[in-house]
Image (tube, rainbow, N blue to C red):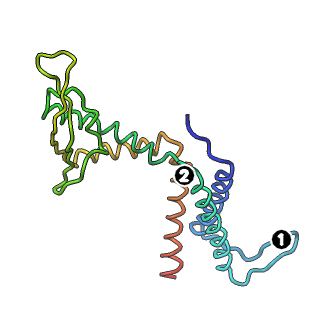
Amino acid sequence: MENEMPEGVLRQRRNFLLFSLIVSAYIFLDIKISDISIFGIKLVVSNAENIFWVLVFFWLYFFWRFYQYTKKVPTLGVSNTFRGYFYRNLKPYLDKTVTKNYPKALSHHEVAFYNLKSKPLFLYEYNGELSFAVEGKDNHYKSEKVTLTFNKVHFIFPWFRACASLIFKESCFSDYVLPYLLGVLIFFYILIGKVMFA
């Protein structure tokens, strides 16, 4: 069962997304505002560019508020969900490698991604123990030290599959990650298009 988004986070997310859409529309639709009506009072804007920076100010404020509120959430579920998909997608390759090198091993659960150490030449290495049956004795096993190497190339496809599963299947991506991605894209556009090359 998925965790519901706290009310405070939901409110700040809504405000942030609203201003993200407003700023995006202002940028890409090339909107020009010459006057504003507040409580029936018509205000003439002498410099339309200032409207954009007022919108950016409020956008940054809600971006900051959304960040503050998400920091208070104990777990967003994004990293744990991704790891779950990644480990499940990777397990067949790990099991196949263990079986190929140690066909008499009783179990493969010891060989998991979090037990692997990165090595040069695109390799991961497992230095640990595997359980083997004791010959001639039923229900007896022994642990032996083993070393296994895994090619990192085989980790790429499970990683992309895990990303796709997270993006298309899990709401935690659209709830938390997507607003940040949108915010980062808008920020860099403002920084590059409106500040550095204005």
* Residue type of the residue flagged with mark 1: Ile
114 vs 130: above or below? below
Q: Position of residue 164 (x, y in %)?
A: 40, 44
Give the CA distance from mark 1 to mark 2.
Answer: 34 Å
Q: Position of residue 6 (x, y in %)?
A: 65, 47
Q: How many marks?
A: 2
Which residue does the image show at 65% across and 73% down from the upper left?
Answer: 57
Q: Position of residue 193 (x, y in %)?
A: 50, 76
Number of residues whose C-alpha sits closer than 10 Å to that of mark 2, classed few (under 14), some (14–19) or many (20 or more): many
Q: Position of residue 20 (x, y in %)?
A: 61, 62
Residue with the mark numbered 2: 176
* Camera-nearest residue between 143 and 34: 143
- Mark before the other along the chain sequence, 1 or 2: 1
Which residue does the image show at 45% across and 42% down from the upper left?
Answer: 81
Would you identify the image quadrant in which residue 83 lies? top left
Residue with the mark numbered 1: 38
* Residue type of the residue flagged with mark 2: Tyr
Which residue does the image show at 21% across and 37% down from the upper left?
Answer: 129
176 vs 28: above or below? above
157 vs 12: above or below? above
